[in-house]
Image (cartoon, rainbow, N blue to C red):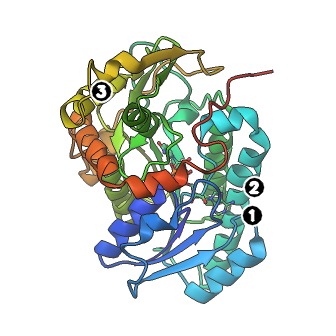
Amino acid sequence: MKLLVTGGAGFIGSAVVRQAIAAGHEVVNLDALTYAACLDNLASVADDPGYAFEHADIRDRAALDRVFAQHRPDAVMHLAAESHVDRSIDGPGTFIDTNVMGTFHLLEAARAYWTREGRPEDFRFHHISTDEVFGSLGPEGQFTEETPYDPRSPYSASKAGSDHLVRAWHETYGLPVVLTNCSNNYGPFHFPEKLIPVVILNALAGKPLPIYGDGSNVRDWLYVEDHAEALLLVVQKGAVGRSYNIGGENERTNLELVQTLCAILDRKRPRDSGSHADLITFVTDRPGHDARYAIDPARIREELGWRPSVTVEEGLEKTVRWYLDNRPWWQALLDREGVGQRLGTTSE
Ligand SMILES: NC(=O)c1ccc[n+]([C@@H]2O[C@H](COP(=O)([O-])OP(=O)(O)OC[C@H]3O[C@@H](n4cnc5c(N)ncnc54)[C@H](O)[C@@H]3O)[C@@H](O)[C@H]2O)c1
């Protein structure tokens, strides 16, 4: 297949691009290269004859039309987005522009191209979204594909909006779409402003390990390589108009997660004295911090035969190893604007 991947220089997008190329697909990576992008993530495929890069913005309709006409993709995998909840609290406008308006422009460019091509049935527009659109769970229950939307942050509201647009373009214009809503990803190449890389890098530097609130918030952790595999399966085999929840079957509180990371680091890089867990520091909670997310992955398991390949302990072990082995990658990113600072602390 020839895949047009948006946001392919980001964390999840780059995992998709690397796996797609390894599986023999052709990939056009369209990315605006925002602060969150890193082309080094794609060094292993950059010279592959099946890989092409387009430096373009999904809000630029003319650029999108040119890319569709020039590359004539079989499918779009749309991952480009503003993705950091804390940044969405400080500056929601960019999230609405990119995630809602950008998705609108991409849908319109895809629809124009698909119509010109004679509305091929096997074309796919795959929107990659989040479980955060479903809101927050209590101690029991899981999100299914039928859970009503209840987004609570500017980020999740913008992703809910883009999900609705994608469904509407299917219902109204017949565009063959598929959607996926996944839980929190982690793994190699994770940008050092998100919890897991922050904890690893602060621990290595002997700095405090910040945990929001009392650390009781629960997330369902999904290893990024497992997620990329699921996405490539859905774009090829998912039923048109259908959405699939993708979860890691690995619920942990933030405190448990950080303690597990500390135990791994204690083995791999022991401190001179004490445990890395001694660095854990509880900080003011994020405004509107969702208590618990958990995914019921029954649909993707039963219909497409996908399951996560690692437990969170195995995935964290691989992740810590990767950060220990790839210091030049993360060192360069730590100098970018806002990285390493606490963001999104005030709702005023
Ligand atoms: N990371 C997670 O845990 C997670 C969980 C659920 C869903 N998602 C979704 O998966 C997708 C990818 O997430 P990620 O963590 O890899 O994000 P990321 O922030 O690492 O990467 C986003 C990429 O999109 C690009 N981009 C941003 N605005 C753009 C624009 N206007 N035009 C073109 N490119 C643009 C950036 O340059 C970057 O390369 C997002 O849609 C996100 O909402 C992520």
Q: Is residue 321 above or below residue 107?
A: above
Q: Is residue 270 above or below residue 306?
A: above
Q: Nearer the viewer, residue 140 or 70?
A: 70
Q: State the mark number for residue 262.
A: 3
Q: Which residue is mark 1?
A: 59
Instruction: Answer left or right for 82 relative to 1.
Output: right
Q: Nearer the viewer, residue 318 or 222?
A: 318
Badge 2 amino acid: Met
Q: Are marks 3 and 1 in contact (CB under 8 Å)?
A: no
Q: Are marks 2 and 3 in contact (CB under 8 Å)?
A: no
Q: Residue furthest front?
A: 272
Q: Earlier in the sequence, mark 2 or mark 3?
A: 2
Badge 1 amino acid: Arg
Label 2's element?
helix
Q: Are marks 1 and 2 in contact (CB under 8 Å)?
A: yes
Q: Which residue is mark 2?
A: 101
Q: Earlier in the sequence, mark 3 or mark 1?
A: 1
Badge 3 amino acid: Cys
Label 1's element?
loop
Q: Is residue 18 above or below residue 289?
A: below
Q: State the mark number for residue 30.
A: none
User: Ligand 1: does it lie within 8 Å of the C-beta at label 1?
Assistant: yes
Q: Disc 2 vs disc 3: which is toward the camera?
A: 3
Residue 10 at x, y = what percent?
52, 58
Other residues around mark 3 within 10 Å, as few (<14) / some (14–19) / many (≥20): many
Can residue 143 be seen here? The reply is: yes
Give the residue at x 61% y 28%: 150
User: Ligand 1: does it lie within 8 Å of the C-beta at label 3?
Assistant: no
Residue 246 at x, y = what percent?
38, 43
Assign the N terminus to one quadrant of the image: bottom left
Label 3's element?
helix
Q: Earlier in the sequence, mark 1 or mark 2?
A: 1
